[in-house]
Each structure stands twice: as C-alpha cells, then as structure tokens.
Amino acid sequence: MAELPAPHQQTLDAIYRAYEAKAERNHRSYLGMSIMGNECDRALWYAFRWAHPPENLDGRKLRLFETGHREEARMLDDLEQAGVRVERVDPATGEQWALSALGGHFRGHMDGQGEGFLEAPKTRHVLEFKTHNEKSFKALVKDGVQKSKPGHYAQMQLYMHFSGLSRAFYMAVNKNTDEIHTERIEYDGQAAIVLVARAERIIQSAEPPAKLHDDPASKMAWVCNYCPAFAQCHGGQFAPRSCRTCIHSTPVDGGWHCEHHGALDAEAQRKGCSLHLYIPALVPGEQIDADPETGTVTYRMADGATWIDGGAA
C-alpha cells in the first residue's frame, strides 16, 4: 500500500510568507561597518555599488535574523540585572547609536553603551551582542573573538574608533544551550585606521577591485560560492541597472552626484535613467569601441556577439 503524502503545512507557509512580505528588499545606501570583516574587497565594492541583486532571503532565514535581534534586548536586560548602567539608545537622538564617516558612505549602529562593569567600573564600553550556533560558540570560547570571529572584532574596533571609546564588551549566546560568553576588547588604533583606509579605498574606487579568487572552482575559493555577487563576479551575468552601476555617477561627500542630473537621492539612484551607461568592468564582455558623440560603448560578448551600451537618449 502506498504511503499517504504528508499533509501540507499551510499555516507554516503563511507564517514564513508574512516575514517575506514585510522584509526590506533594497540594498543599504552605505557601506556597513558590520561587514568589514569580509576579506574580499570586491564583494564589499559590489555591495556598495548595488552591483548584484539584493539578497532574497526566505521566511525561515528572516525569522532567524529576527531571533538574533530579539536576543539583544534580553542581553541588555541581563547586563542591567548584573548592575551595569546601560544606554540602549543615543540620548541625543532617542534612537539607536549611529556612527557615520567618509561623507556618510560608511556607517554602523552600536547595540548600546554601558559602564559599571565589575572588571572596569569607571570605563565606558561599546556593547556588541551576537548569537552563535554550537560549533561557532565552541570556537569562540576556545579561541576568542579576534581569532574565531575576525569580522565581529573588526566591527567593534570601528565602533570604538568612531565613538571615541577605548573598550568594547562582547556578549555572545549559544543558541543551542543558552550559555553566555563575554569578552572585553581593547581598542587597537592601528587596526582601526587600516580598516577605515580600506573602506575609503572601496568607496572611492571607480571600478571593482581584483577578485579574491580567479578560479571559483578551486579549493580555496569555496567562500565565493556563498557570495551574493557570485553570478556577476564569476558567472558572466550583468549587474542590475542603477545609478551606482553607471559610469556617470560618483560618491561625493554627503551623497551621490551624476554628471547629467546633479545630486541623487536613494530613490533616484535605484530608479536610474535612460542615460545609464555601465561601468565597463561590470559588462561581461570585451570593450572594442566607444563613441563620445552618441554616448555608446561597444562590447564583444563571450559568445562572439556584439552588444552596444548606451545611446538611449
């Protein structure tokens, strides 16, 4: 006798769809301090230039991220119960602690600030909270945050650098067991300056930096397969059209500027216009001609066909 099919979980599907319906599907308008632990300059440049589609996370993953955000409030409660004086929001704005640099193109958001830690009662700390799975948490306890989670370490160095604080308090929770791990991190000015210089180089670069790995099939390039820009970087696909993938627009202090339209807000950048002309390095073909009078650039594509960019006006 054939087995009956498992009943379809319609209510569960509805729960996940609700998360997907309320999710923000646009790129950030800035390069985030929280992603500077990514070792690939090119991946960071693609994210800043909106040169790959926004990640389309499913409802389960969106709920997982929300779980991490909800845990932050609980960890703040834990610190307060232990006698730490916590500031959850910036008293000057009433909103989350925000940091901005490099003309507003480089930003970060702290989970809070606190003082009154038993280890250093008079020292004000940046607060950073994370949740980990079992494997990640064990590595964290064994090796510490700097070695096991260099991205988190870099994030805290930047937050200390731009907030003027000299210490950070890292608090992590094991999602499997609810065990807590804490570390006090000391400000490393040299490390922070290197990170800021890297961010400035990425923001100001008119073309994508070199690939981290030329051959995505190599053993060392396994990380490339999880990159949201894989199709554009290695797969020969076009980047999405927006002002940030257009040769006419440039990041300037306080925003973006177009040679044709002047200042561009985020909505205009996403919409683009008929004068869009790809940054040549984003076209999966070889440039063979350019005509300044018609505003066109001609490429020979991988299949031998000729493709002309621009001239729509």
Image: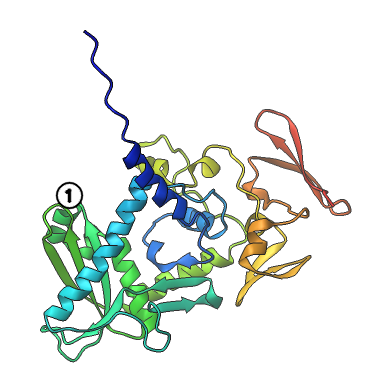
Q: Toward which corner of the image does residue 203 lie, by quadrant? A: bottom right
Residue 221: horizontal and vertical position, in percent? 38, 42
Residue 219: horizontal and vertical position, in percent? 34, 37
Residue 111: horizontal and vertical position, in percent? 31, 73
- Name the outermost residue toward the right: 293
Q: Is residue 94 left or right of residue 240?
A: left
Can residue 187 be spotted in the picture? Answer: no
Can residue 83 be spotted in the picture? Answer: yes
Residue 80: horizontal and vertical position, in percent? 17, 80
Give the residue displayed 67% in from the left and 57% down from the top.
271
Query: Quarter of the image containing the N terminus?
Result: top left
Q: Between residues 263 and 251, which one lies in front from this camera angle?
A: 263
Q: Secondary structure at mark 1?
A: helix
Label 1 packing within 10 angstroms: few (<14), some (14-19), many (20+): few
Query: In this figure, which residue is indicated by the disc labeled 1?
Result: 135
Q: Between residues 17 and 71, which one lies in front from this camera angle?
A: 17
Number of numbered markers: 1
Give the residue displayed 68% in from the left and 34% down from the top.
301
Give the residue displayed 63% in from the left and 63% down from the top.
267
- Name the outermost residue toward the top: 1
Q: In the rendered structure, which amino acid carries the disc numbered 1?
A: Lys
Query: Vertical placement of 45 versus 165: above or below?
Result: above
Query: Vertical placement of 32 versus 189: above or below?
Result: above
Q: Toward which corner of the image does residue 246 lie, by quadrant? A: bottom right
Give the residue displayed 42% in from the left and 77% down from the top.
98
Q: Toward which corner of the image does residue 164 lie, by quadrant? A: bottom left
Q: Between residues 241 and 68, which one lies in front from this camera angle?
A: 68
